Amino acid sequence: MKKIAVLTSGGDSPGMNAAVRAVAKKAIYHDLEVFGVYRGYEGLMSGEIKSLKLEDVGGIIHRGGTILGSARSEKFKTEDGQLQAMNNLNNFGIDALVVIGGDGSYRGAQALHKKGIKTIGLPGTIDNDINGTDFTLGFSTAVNTVIEAIDRIRDTATSHERTFVIEVMGRDAGDIAAWAGLANGAESIFIPEKTTGKEGMIARLKQGFERGKKHSIIIVAEGVGTAEEFADYIREHSSYDARVTVLGHIQRGGSPVGFDRILGTRLGAKAVELLMADVAGKALGLEKNEISVHDFDYVFQKKASKRLEEFSKLSMELSM
Ligand code: ATP
C-alpha cells in the first residue's frame, strides 16, 4: 500500500479536519503518498482528487467543518457511480481510502471495499448514532454548543419567569437532547428512542412554578416533533405561555472542542496504521477510551441506547 486517499461525506462535523490532518500527517510520516478527495463521493466520481502535502493540512486542527468539503450523492449509490469512482482511484493508483462520515458514508465505503479498495470508516457525525463507538466525531462539540445556547436562553427565561421549548438536532437519535438536557438541568427532555407523553411535562411545569422556580427548560429532539407543537400543547393545557427556540445549524458548526480534536487525531492515525498492516473493511470507534475496530456490518446495527435511558431517568429525578 503506497497511496492512500481521504474523504469526508454526509453532514460535516467538528473534528473532521483533525482526522484529515492526522491521516495525511501519519501517512507522510511513513513515506506514503496521500490524496484528498474533495466533496465526498461526488468528487470521487468526478475526479476531484488532489495530492495532500504537509502545508495543506497545517493550521486546520482548530477549524470546524471540513477543508475537503462534503456532499451527498445519489449517483454514488448506483453500480455506475461506484465504477466511475473505482476508475478514478485506479487511475491515481490509490489502493486505500479513509472515509469520514456517518452510516450512509460507511455503506459507500463498504461497497468500495467489496470492489477491491481497502477502506476504513471513521465516525464523523454530530448525532452519536453509530454502533460500535461511545462517541462520534463532532458530538461533543455539538453538545457544548447546545449547552452554551441554552445557558443564554436560561438567563432570559429566569429574568422573565418563562418556559422555553428548545428544539435540537436528532431525527433518529436523542443523544444531543439527552446530554444537553442533563448538562442544562432541563425540566423535560423528549427523545425519539423513548415515547413519553406530554402530560408529565405539564405536571412538572406546574410543580416547578408552584415551588417558586423562575424558569423552565424543555428540550425536544427534532425526531419527536417540533418545538412549536410542544409550546402549543403547553398553552392549551396550562395557564403558562411558552417561547420557542430552534437551534438548527449552529449545532453543526464551530471550532471543535478538545475532545473532538483528540478523537479525530487518534482515529485518523489509527486508520493509517491499520491500512499499513493490511487491515481494511473496518469502522473505527472509541470504546472505553480505546480505539475499537469493527466490521461495517456490526456498526450498521442499531446502537443500544443504554446511556439514553440512564440520562433520561436521571434528568427526570433531578428536575423536581
Ligand atoms: P449523516 O449522519 O451526517 O447524515 P451520512 O454519512 O449518514 O452522514 P448520508 O447522506 O446517509 O450521510 O450518506 C452520505 C453519502 O454516502 C450518500 O450521499 C451516498 O453517496 C453514500 N451512500 C449512502 N448510502 C449508500 C449505499 N447504500 N451504498 C453506497 N453509497 C451510499
Image (cartoon, grey):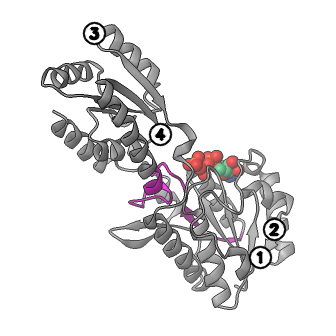
**What residue is pinned by disc 3?**
239
Q: Position of residue 139 (x, y in %)?
A: 46, 54
The residue positioned 78% from the left and 54% from the top of the image is: 42
Q: CA distance from mark 1 to mark 4?
A: 36 Å
Magenta extent: 116-142
Q: CA distance from mark 2 to mark 4?
A: 32 Å
* Dot 1 amino acid type: Ile
**What residue is pinned by disc 2?**
49
The residue positioned 78% from the left and 47% from the top of the image is: 75
Q: CA distance from mark 1 to mark 3?
A: 65 Å
Q: Position of residue 252 (x, y in %)?
A: 55, 48
| Residue contact between numbered discs 2 and 1, judged by CB atoms under 8 Å | yes
In this rendering, does residue 14 appear at all? yes
* Dot 4 amino acid type: Gly
First along the sequence among labels 2 and 1:
2
Q: Of tags 1 and 3, which is closer to the observer?
A: 3
First along the sequence among labels 3 and 4:
4
Q: Position of residue 92 (x, y in %)?
A: 84, 75
**What residue is pinned by disc 4?**
170
The residue positioned 34% from the left and 8% from the top of the image is: 236
| Residue contact between numbered discs 1 and 3, judged by CB atoms under 8 Å | no
Count of marks, rendered view: 4
Q: Of tags 3 and 2, which is closer to the observer?
A: 3
Relative to 145, is 69 on the left or the right? right
Q: Which mark is residue 94?
A: 1
| Residue contact between numbered discs 3 and 4, judged by CB atoms under 8 Å | no
Please rate how many residues cluster around mark 3, counting C-alpha atoms within 10 Å: few if below 14, some from 14 to 19, many from 20. Answer: few
The residue positioned 72% from the left and 49% from the top of the image is: 77
Q: CA distance from mark 3 to mark 4?
A: 29 Å
In magenta stretch: residue 86: no
In magenta stretch: residue 133: yes
